Image: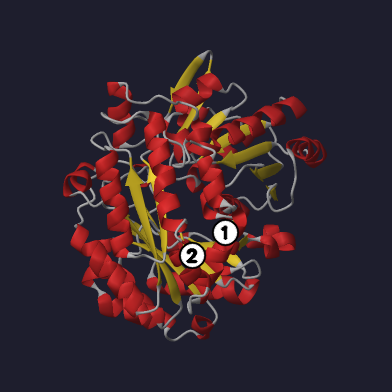
Amino acid sequence: MTISKILFIEPPRNYWFVMGEYLPPPTTLLILAAYVERELPNIEIEVLDCQARQITWEGLERHIESSKPSVVLTSGFTCNAYSCARTAEITKRVDNDIVTIVGGSHFSFVPEESLTNFPEIDIIIRGEGEQTLINLLQALHKVKKLRTIHGISFRHKQKIIHTEPQPLIENLDTLPYPAYHLVEDYIHRYHFTMMAGRNTQYMILEGSRGCEYRCTFCTQWNHWQGQWRTKSIKRIADEIEFLNETYGGVFLWFTDDHINLAARGKKLYNELQKRPCKEDIMLFLQARTDDVAKHPTVVQNLRSVGTYWIMCGVENNSSATLKEYKKNVRTEDAYQTMKILKENDIFSHAMFVIGNRSDAHTSIEQLRQFSYDLHPDFAIYTALTPFPGTIYFQKAHENGWIQDYNYANYDMAHAIMPTEILSRKDVQHELWQCYNHFYGSYTRNIAGVFSPNRLKRVLYRHMAGQHVLSKLRRLV
């Protein structure tokens, strides 16, 4: 078949209400689009972001009709799986000859289930997608057998075929910058109001892929084949400078599962120190508590080159639970981390998980008290969610713990499983209590609204305006 045009689609979807109002750029699609643009310049490329352009499902169907692509590609996490499937369904309704491709961590882990349940999906790209997509497009164009393409799953004569995994890209510096020029007309609409205000240009930066840790509830280390690969420090700084100077990117969220201060912190500081963009950027980093606790000077230095916000997976106060999660951190690290962040005027963002098998009302109350004692600027509580591809999913599925297989609810705000003591409804109520106790405090809210820290003022005012507590209460 002739592959003349590929349409990358970010479908209509509901974003995580816990984080308030925000609109992220479709980074995965922009990275893939940039790679195709470079490697296969004869193929026309379009990126359609239905969120940014406020296109409904009906509007999406009309757009596909007028666009006339040869291939439609979309990608998503578990909670967005149905949106991806619906995109493929609409595509086939427009023209059954359009090849529908989906990717992302969810479909990578459950390709058999997905191809069985969603016949409108033609091909699944598993794992890292750049080179697989190029090879696949070339094969489709030359009518080459798909069995020869590594990293895909597809149907053939009523059977589902899974080819060998695609080798990982050795040098991430060889990747082009994300193709933001393909969404330049509405790039100004991307924002993270709760974190940086409505008018601060929000963009996403990928500095590395994978993780060397093995947390039982996390999909990402498994998705990237258990390896941690980083771009060079110069490339990371170059990309920050490019996003800032070319597109006005100010609030930049590192997608890296952890910034790895030990390996990159000092080098990143030294490189950014030389760049004038450091005066104009607000970096959002994700870090492990043990990494922050061990490198206070590095954290202090990174603050001076634009690091304003650090999110840490504190997870739990129980050493037994942390061991069960394979976090390899201590509660002492969490206390030290919050202290270091506050001393350096870095917004402290702590993540907590409730709902492990041993949890009871008393243990969750202890976790709540622990979170108050840590006194982070921002706390997010999540229900332990058995995402496909995690160690926890396999264990929970085998033991019959999962009571909800509706992937739309796999957003960490819905309780999916009971504990040995608590019902699923009990877990949902405890999650509401966590938020209500932390954000329902008049003292804390007043302090937040009038905080000298601008980010904290923005966040608390936005939380109140978005009625996040009310939305969580409706889930109980």
Q: Are marks 2 and 1 in contact (CB under 8 Å)?
A: yes
Q: Quadrant of residue 243?
A: bottom right
Of the two numbered discs 2 and 1 on the same chain, state the one appearing first in sequence: 2
Front residue of 470 and 458? 470
Which residue was labeled with disc 1?
464
Q: Amino acid at mark 2?
A: Asn
Residue where numbered disc 2 is placed? 445
**Residue 111 vertical placement versus 431 (above, below):** above
Task: Indicate how the structure is coloured in the image.
Answer: secondary structure
Front in this rendered view, residue 327 or 271: 327
Crowd tier of the residue under label 2, counting other residues whose Cα lies within 10 Å: few below 14, some 14–19, many 20 or above? some
Q: Is residue 407 left or right of residue 259?
A: right
Residue 133: give x, y in percent of width and height: 54, 42
Position of 271 compared to 370: left or right?
right
Report the amino acid beneath label 1.
Ala
Residue furthest out toward the top: 158
Residue, x 52% and y 29% (percent of image)?
146
Q: Secondary structure at mark 1?
A: helix
Q: Nearer the viewer, residue 36 or 453?
A: 453
Residue at (81% x, 37% y) in the render: 62
Drawn side of residue 421 relative to residue 387, left or right = left
